[in-house]
Image (cartoon, rainbow, N blue to C red):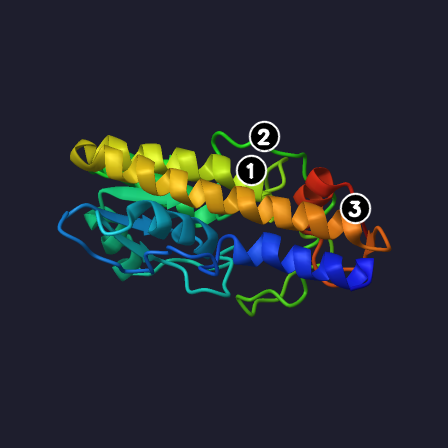
Amino acid sequence: LTRRRALLAAATAGGIGATAGCLEGSGGSGDTGASETSAQSSFFVFGDIADHVAGDAAASELLVPVGQHGHGWEPGPRVREDIGDADLFVHGMEGFQPWVYNIRGDLLADGADVATVDASADVSLLEAGDHRQEEDDHDGEDHEEGDDHDSGAMDPHFWMDPIRTREAVGTISQGFADVDPANADTYIENAESFGAQLEDLHERIDSLVAEASSDVLLVAGHDSFSYFVDRYGVTVE
């Protein structure tokens, strides 16, 4: 492999493979077990982590279809009902999916017995650049020139770094343990197992980068590789 091809492979593995069910041991969305504990996730990355942590001890489901970000997406009544019926609602940082925090406000106002966990809460985040909303938005909506990818000041794409993703695994594991203490040991064990796979992924990417022949990666369409750059010291154009 040339360094460019190696970096493309590594980027794909780091951004998608770690968090979209490519690693062994994924529970699979909607996996149910003996426990009645249930979790709903707002984004496929968070949903995949929740699947790994839940295993057979809890039910884990995804609210926004894979391939959609949810930036311009608004949940219908059924989605709100699903969240209201869940024990745990897993989501990202404020500004990443604005509808999430509207629903969180509704849950608080209603006194709903639903715990919420921000997957990025314990992650060392990077400041966001001047991101423009990607033109091929998976939601199929038009955006004006200059629209920011996120309304907050921090870059949400931490899952491009397996080590940071491992921190989110621990955060979500604690969220499950808080709502279902009887299965806390199982959630911790599942999180440790998935964390080990992420560590292995990190080592494989690190090796690919070290052995490649060029340190520049060309990416079109969407500036989402800041965490990959920060971890592996490559240049992204």
**Is 57 rendered above or below residue 183?**
below
CA gap, disc 1 and disc 3: 17 Å
Marker count (numbered): 3
Quadrant of residue 27 within the rendered picture? bottom left
Image spot of residue 142 (x, y percent): 62, 66
Image spot of residue 52 (x, y percent): 36, 50
Q: Mark 2 or mark 1, which has the lower sequence index? A: 2
SS at badge 2: loop
Q: Nearer the viewer, residue 9 or 159?
A: 9
Image spot of residue 60 (x, y percent): 29, 53
Quadrant of residue 2 within the rendered picture? bottom right
Report the residue marked by disc 1. Answer: 164
Amino acid type of disc 2? Ser
Report the residue marked by disc 2. Answer: 124
Disc 2 vs disc 1: which is toward the camera? 1
Q: How crowded is mark 2: few (under 14 residues within 10 Å), some or many (20 or more)?
A: few
**Is 111 rendered above or below residue 52?**
above
Report the residue marked by disc 3. Answer: 234
The quadrant of the picture occupied by the N terminus is: bottom right
Q: Mark 1 or mark 3, which has the lower sequence index? A: 1
Disc 3 vs disc 2: which is toward the camera? 3
CA gap, disc 3 and disc 2: 19 Å
Image spot of residue 209 (x, y percent): 75, 50
Outermost residue toward the right?
Answer: 214
SS at badge 3: loop
